[in-house]
Amino acid sequence: MSQVTAKFLKDYQSPKFTIENINLDVNLLGAQTRVVATSQVQRLDSAAKVLVLDGESLQLSSVKINGQAVEYIEADGKLSITVDFDQFELEIVTILDPAANTSLEGLYMSDGAYCTQCEAEGFRRITYYLDRPDVLAKFTVRIEADKAQFPYLLSNGNPIDAGELDGGRHFVCWQDPFPKPCYLFALVAGDFDLLEDKFTTRSGRDVKLQVFVDKGNLSKSQHAMASLKKAMEWDESRFGLEYDLDIYMIVAVDFFNMGAMENKGLNVFNTKYVLADKATATDVDYHGIEAVIGHEYFHNWTGNRITCRDWFQLSLKEGLTVFRDQEFSSDMGSRAVNRINAIKVIKNQQFAEDTGPMAHPIRPESVMEMNNFYTVTVYNKGAEVIRMLHTLLGEEGFQAGMRLYVERHDGHAVTCDDFVAAMEDASGVDLALFRRWYSQSGTPIVNVMDSYDANKKRYTLTLKQHTPATAEQAVKQALHIPFSIELLAADGHSLLNKVLDFVENEQEFVFDNIDQKPLVSLLQDFSAPVKLVYNFSIEHLVHLMQFATSEVARWEASVNLFSQTVWQNVAKLAAEQAMVVDPRVVDAFRAVMLATDLDAELVAEILTLPSLSALVEQVDSVDLDALTAARRYVVDTIANECEDELLAKYRQLAQEQTIGARALKNSCLILLTSTAVDIDTLVQQQYQQADNMTDSLAALQAANVGALACRQALLTDFEAQWKDTPLVMDKWFALQACFNNEQVFDAIENLKQHSAFSFENPNRVRSIIGSFAMANLAQFHRVDGRGYQLLTDWLIVLNKVNPQVAARMITPLIQFGKFDQSRQQLIKVQLQRLMDLPDLSKDLYEKVFKALA
Ligand code: B3K
Ligand code: ZN
């Protein structure tokens, strides 16, 4: 694998040739599928005498220029053609075998339907092409296939022609009027159920909306359609952005590497983010569908109309579009709960990426395999960076920046710098220092000290920032951090609410006319993606839980209170002292259970006590066994001390049918597994009476977490009921993979043989090995190394079947820095096993190489 080399942002060169129009003729003939790509090529640099095209795993049939066969060199994923015209027609014929393509990139089969995935560099598996996002062409596509098997033939843009052919075949032609990079090309051919609707844009244009799902699933497509209409409406009202084609299609497929793909006018979706009804989908699933449908729709402007110059700029479209989808979800539902979930992703996953071997800035500087950079850093930290801009500019300034960005760059492939410049020019806010967020990786640590001078009525805050070195970048500089604070009085009323401009390594902020010693709420709503260090007392956190104006700040205080208590007990264990929980901690959680003025969804979040993995991310090194014991002790203590309140709440909510009530009831149920109540009966009752997946799954989860006697019977019943519904079976797989017991190893071995399982389906793979490695910390990190070995066994299989999915699943194995030496050694043995594979994919190589370096 030594031929794998990195590409660097600093080496970017504009294209020497471009393609303005392409006619793609795709004749779907199984293993002999034939693609004729006819491109109108333009030379941009007259000194260029060789056209170099990208291609991978292609069977090349012929190459012609202006109708004449030409000489070419085909080597190392490139096709080089000597040519000396300023303008010419290039015709390339390739033969594909979609059914053999298990990588699910390029053209492949999903359950008997043809479909494509081209981002980032999948188009080169369809034909030789200038596969880079700054080459924008108008696509005309003709698809031909057997009519009975593939009645729907879809591609981007508008249908312009269709007809019958001999031998039961037919064709459809599509034309996309908007020039686009090839990563936005899509083709789907298959037989589906179709849900249709329409949307009238605010300028009065009718858009036909279509959702295609596997036969028999029509009744599960309503929520996706409703979400699409909400997203279209919201983008008009909040961002002033209107849809631009006459048709918008969504196709749901079961074999898909990620969540969904924003191909122009023809989104391809993982079924997980389309199909839902009450019986099969949880409230969390419903929310996820709305968010992802929104996300892909919002890409139409932030991604498609304005795209990336090169892949290093990925956050230009992804960070911005995640910010937009988060705002959409917040405007549709609970803003606080949406914010809490976004914060959890940063703290539990992105901070971990920063401390591991794959650390990179939101605009990476070097890449081996682009698919490895669709990360929580580029996406979610990228969205935090956009959110900070929004905080600094305010909604009005930000929207003015968006308007200028669209006005300047519509139809072009641009950079992150272009985006920041538009924000700067429209608002007049100086963003020179802010730009460092794009080039600097790592998590800043902000230390806070405060003091109060009663004579001067003066409160002083001293902030210090420093960013530890990351694997790929040693030297760090100060960043522009919008630091939001609130000062609270002893009676709980708010004295001051403000965003501080924190731009130096160390900075003092003085507040005068503060009549009493305030209690401060710091980094409200997580106003910047940083780690906060401040010495909170128990009373201080209890006060914030009760009085902070921001609901997110209340939740944050509860997380701090719980975490602090756990870490104190880890220290007790190390000192061989008895563990304790301060009664004020228990009382604070009890008060939340008893509160009548708090939103149920928020209370559910507070009562979902921080997970083991969330706690692991709070420290630089961890004794996992002590942490597990201390967390268990604190959870058990809170639950047992509050057993009556939990049970009362559970009973009170049992009949209520709202999202909040279900969430809260089910977080009570999980806590009750720690208590002496007859939980087995409670769980079985809930399972049997449930008329929705949220409640039945929660019952199963409780049985699983508590290792209850009813666990096996419920699992068996669930399987019998859902064995033919793959998305529900994923939940069943995931539950068993999360079982904290050594039996999990035998269970996983059996699940692998289950008729519903296939290594070729990413959803199935993620639900078993992904859940095990990412959510079953105790078993994955066993001291005997069995967990590491199991994941590696799977990775060896996936390396051949689907390298992209393999590279996603390896994450917990390369983030080992916090664990003890013996665990690290066991992990490295497994990484070396991978390194020694003769056919290690580029995707895994990049990560294993960096982890072992
Ligand atoms: N843009 C796609 C992700 C493509 C990932 C390629 N490995 C989905 C999205 O972010 O909307
Ligand atoms: Zn996206």
Image: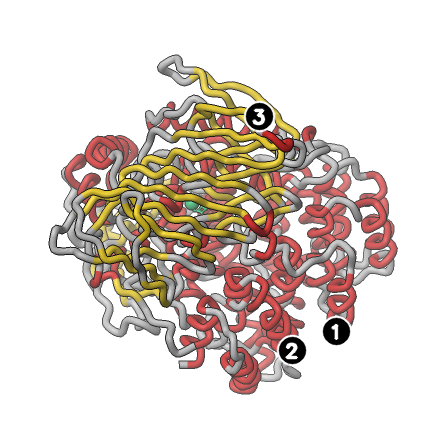
The answer to whether 238 is drawn above or below residue 256 in the figure is above
As rendered, which of 240 and 675 lies closer to the eye?
A: 240
Residue at x-position 72% and y-position 37%: 653
The answer to whether 8 is drawn above or below residue 110 in the figure is below
Q: Indicate the secondary structure of the residue bearing disc 1.
A: loop
Residue at x-position 51% and y-position 19%: 198
Report crowding for label 2: few under 14, some 14 to 19, many 20 or more residues within 10 A (C-alpha). Answer: some
Report crowding for label 3: few under 14, some 14 to 19, many 20 or more residues within 10 A (C-alpha). Answer: few
Check disc 2 and give the amino acid type: Arg
Q: Nearer the viewer, mark 3 or mark 2?
A: 3
Q: Which residue is mark 1?
A: 742
Q: Which residue is mark 2?
A: 782
Q: Which residue is mark 3?
A: 164
Tell me whether the residue at label 2 lies in contact with that at label 1, contact meaning CB atoms closer than 8 angstroms: yes
Q: Position of residue 705 (x, y in %)?
A: 73, 60
Report crowding for label 1: few under 14, some 14 to 19, many 20 or more residues within 10 A (C-alpha). Answer: few
Check disc 1 and give the amino acid type: Glu
Tell me whether the residue at label 1 lies in contact with that at label 3, contact meaning CB atoms closer than 8 angstroms: no
Check disc 3 and give the amino acid type: Glu
The answer to whether 534 is drawn above or below residue 207 in the figure is below
